[in-house]
Amino acid sequence: MKLKAGIIGCGSITKFRHAPEYAANPFVEEIVFYDRNPERAELLASQYAGSVAASLDDLIADPTIDMISDCSSNEFHHINSVKALLGGKHVLCEKPISLTLEGAEQIVQAQKTSNKKLMIDHNQRFTKAHQKARQLIKRKELGEVLTFKTSFGHGGPELWGINKTNTTWFFSKDRSGLGVAGDLGIHKIDLLHYLLDDEIQQVSAFQGTLDKTTVTGEPIEVCDNLVCTLKTAKGRIGTGAFSWTYYGEEDNSTIIYLTGGILKIYHDSEYPLIVVEKDGAMAKYQLETIQTNDNQTSSGVIDSFVNSILHEHEPPVTGEDALVSLKVILAIMEAAETESIVHISGPMSKV
């Protein structure tokens, strides 16, 4: 069985992730591109022997298209993904699922109404080191999780995005909305839920616009740094640090402290996973390197999305999963703005 993919938005995430991964998948026969800037769509269509849709409505109305990647900017996800789902397409939506809970709930409801697949691109679940670490934690090979710390930072989206200037939409409150928290932080919140089989329920935080400026030299409208403390439903406590000002080298590390030792994930450049037991014994796993802005490797997200369609099973990152992570990020933003501890209510999600 061959599938046909459509992509909304032809920025860097499409250029480096979605388009090449669809093209490499043996079950995808063609990609149809749409962008408000037709030249971007035409360039990728030429590169991948695809075609260009004249409008968003044309893309969604095309009966030959089975699935759509929503790679539009954050403020459009709740519009485009809803339209695509209700238009009968399976949807892979970029993170964050939405800028608001209301928008996220609209997408989740559209999935239920349409009965189509909905997957959110929280790609950190798919790395070999994270999957191995989750396995070790689940088996309790190092005992019970006590504390954790996670970090995600690089030099900023203007260095990677399609628009490599400080006019990037990531710096706009109306479009990015959540700044570094919605760009990088939400990845780590989803990852913690996945690794720990747990859910963050209390948060506090500090945020700041420390270095990024607009073209006129004013501070950007959203935070470029955020540090938070996190407590889970099972009582684990930890920290998260998210930054657009880690100049010179990225940090995408997570360390889990357990009763029987430590898991160090992407903390060492040579060994993606290091296990340090309580008695000092050490095991080093040379699994793979994590994606960075300078090292774009296959994420496995597209393959997983396609497999969920072909084999008719639930995608590994559902709309409900993403909604839970968004709740945490919005609570973190509230905590930073109000200088308070924020409690997150709601049932445990499936991870």
Image (cartoon, rainbow, N blue to C red):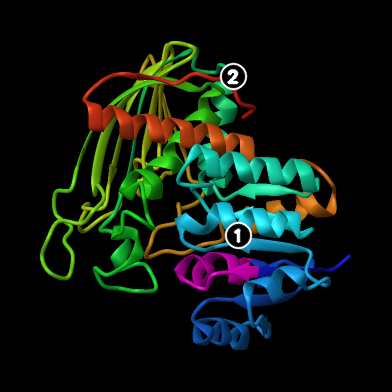
Instruction: Give the overall secondary structure of the magenta segment.
Output: helix
Report the disc number at residue 80. 1
- Gap between marks 2 and 1 measured at Cα: 27 Å
Q: Is residue 144 magenta?
A: no
Residue extending furthest toward the right = 1
- Of residue 284 and residue 250, the one placed in the foreground of this image is 250
Residue at the image position 56 percent from the left and 23 percent from the top? 197
Q: Position of residue 279 (x, y in %)?
A: 37, 14
Residue segment shown in magenta: 7-21
CA neighbours of label 1 inside 10 A, class few (<14), some (14 to 19), many (20+): many
Using the rendered image of the protein, determine whether residue 315 is visible from the camera's viewpoint. no
Disc 2: which residue: 347
The reply, left or right, for residue 53 in relation to residue 279 is: right
Q: Quadrant of residue 212?
A: bottom left
Residue at the image position 23 percent from the left and 53 percent from the top? 221
Q: Quadrant of residue 266?
A: top left
Residue at the image position 38 percent from the left and 29 percent from the top? 331
Q: Quadrant of residue 71?
A: bottom right
